[in-house]
Image (spheres, grey):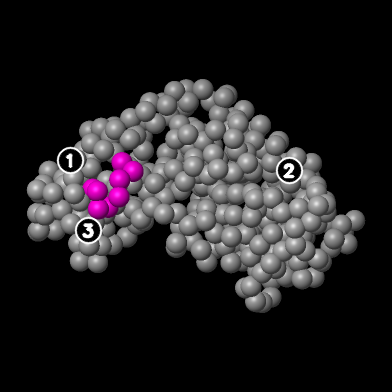
Amino acid sequence: MRFSARSLACCCCASVLSAGPRGYSWIRRKADLNTVVDRIFSGIQPTGTPHLGNYLGAIQNWVNLQEECSSVLYSIMDMHSLTMPKEPAVLRQNILDTTAAILACGIDPKKCFLFRQSLMKRASQNNEGTVGLLTYPVLQAADILLYKSTHVPVGEDQVLHLELAQDIAQHFNKKYGEFFPVPKAILSTTKKIKSLRDPTVKMSKSDPQKLATVNIADSPDEIVLKFRKAVTDFTSEVTYDPASRPGVSNLVSIHAAVTGLSIKEVLHQSAGLDTAHYKMVVAESVIQKFAPIRNEIKKLQEDKSHLIKVLEDGAEKAKELAAPIYQEIRRLVGFQ
């Protein structure tokens, strides 16, 4: 099967990238290719084991969405990850570690399509080159449109990333007839998780400060140390005021997210605690949340062949879904 997200971009993007209105609508038809089916697409870059912010902001939502929607695709975005140079062996291991982690978090290949982005490339495309790195937004849009995705889970800071895919869908439909649904954003309800060392920026795996980021596979001792060293302020009371008390408020957000409690409930439970003791309460909540996930990650990482098979099986299912869409695009634009 000779198609890829990049070749889709060549078919449907080049002629429709001019600016245009953002309003949209589409017609629900009975024909198979033109029937709008609620379909969710999202991806994660293979940077190894995800961190606390990845889990609370995206992966936890993925798990919920696979239970609520009958058509869900999750991709390990290994081609996108090439925007930052990596040793091939490191990338291969990161792909497997990321796969193990999201499976351990509750992603079920029986309820979704889980696959590697690069397994959808052309069979004859041996040299990826650098063009994909220069056209990252187009590649991202093509990933979304290739499956006629209707919804894309994103954080508030990622909504703009979806606009190119929306514009391409609108312009393609205007020129060739109503074909693509215009993908909508599904916003995460979780507060953005901030760095434990600088609560004015979001938590990131690339943060040079090792104590800033909690990874979901961290040991209990590592988690305790990171929360003990978390930056707060000189007021001992536990309150929630992100503008004036970002450090303590970040801890409250984390506590609420891992326990499923509201901010109000967390503050009520924490009344009377000083911030030093409260840090340990939050650390213990995180440890309890991730203990079973951490154990499952270790088990999965020991079975490399299982992880590879999960991704290969998911890619075959995704290809079966995408093939008729891709061929219809080629027909519509006049390539066949």
Residue at 60% x, 49% y is: 40
Q: Which residue is mark 3?
A: 240
Mark 2 burial class by Cα count in 10 Å: few <14, some 14-19, many 20+: some
- Give percent across and percent down for residue 19: 65, 77
Q: Give the alpha-carbon distance from disc 2 to disc 1, as whole Å.
A: 48 Å
Asked if residue 297 lies left or right of residue 321, the reply is: left
Residue 190: mark = none
Q: Amino acid at mark 2?
A: Leu
Mark 1 burial class by Cα count in 10 Å: few <14, some 14-19, many 20+: some
Residue at 20% x, 55% y is: 248
SS of the residue at dot 3? loop
Q: Is residue 9 magenta?
A: no
Sequence-first tag of 2 and 3: 3
Residue at 60% x, 38% y is: 112
Q: Amino acid at mark 1?
A: Met
Sequence-first tag of 3 and 1: 3
Asked if residue 165 lies left or right of residue 43, the reply is: right
Mark 2 vs mark 3: give the one in front. 3
Q: Quadrant of residue 242?
A: bottom left
Q: Which residue is mark 2?
A: 321
SS of the residue at dot 2? helix
SS of the residue at dot 1? helix
Mark 3 burial class by Cα count in 10 Å: few <14, some 14-19, many 20+: many
Q: Give the alpha-carbon distance from disc 2 to disc 3, as whole Å.
A: 46 Å
Q: Are marks 3 and 1 in contact (CB under 8 Å)?
A: no
- For the record, the magenta segment spans 259-266
Quadrant where the image shows the C terminus: bottom right
